[in-house]
Image (cartoon, rainbow, N blue to C red):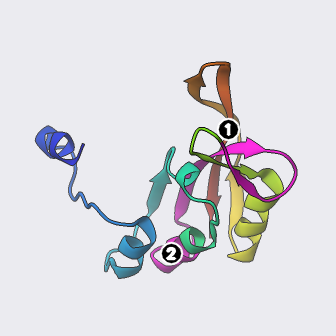
Amino acid sequence: MIQKAEQTGVYDHLAVDDVCSHLNRCPRRFDLLVAGDVLIYMGDLDGVFKSVKSCCKPGDVFVFSVEERGTSGYVLRTTARFAHSRRYVLSCIEKFGMTILRRPSVRIRREKQGWARARLYMVTQ
């Protein structure tokens, strides 16, 4: 995937790394961070929010999607993807002093039984 992305000439920088490690080491600051269909591969999101907070300044925007589940916590599904409850995501946003700009429901991907339920969050600090 990285080789194909490099061939497009669209990206200023590409990295193969753990998201949190990369953000924690990165000397750059970002106005906008987008994690579309990324957090579904992580259960506990504290590290991600902490890393995002470390590389952004007030007013910067973090956009991410999560598959939704019941009323609390997160769970690893048989699809090998995590689903996070709205309450859990809101607690992470609050814990790291972020504010929700928008949080629409979205169709994230087709699966055998239909569309996966997901939510797109746009937050700022």
Q: Is residue 41 magenta?
A: no
**Dot label at residue 51:** 2
Q: CA distance from mark 2 to mark 1?
A: 23 Å
Residue occupying the point 55% across, 68% down: 48
Residue occupying the point 59% across, 70% down: 49
Q: Residue type at mark 2?
A: Ser
Q: Is residue 60 magenta?
A: yes
Q: Residue type at mark 1?
A: Ala
* Secondary structure under the numbered disc 1 in the rendered image: strand
* Residue 80 x %, y %: 56, 45
Residue occupying the point 78% across, 52% down: 85
Question: How would you rate the neighbour count of disc 2 (Cα within 10 Å): few for under 14, some for 14-19, many for 20 or more?
Answer: some
Q: Which residue is mark 1?
A: 118
Of the two numbered discs 2 and 1 on the same chain, state the one appearing first in sequence: 2
* Residue 29 x %, y %: 38, 73
Where is the N terminus found, in terms of image quarters? top left
Query: Which portion, as a residue range, is magenta?
Result: 50-77
Residue occupying the point 46% across, 58% down: 33
Is residue 10 visible to us here? yes
* Residue 28 x %, y %: 32, 75
* Secondary structure under the numbered disc 2 in the rendered image: helix
* Residue 84 x %, y %: 72, 52
Picture quarter containing residue 5? top left
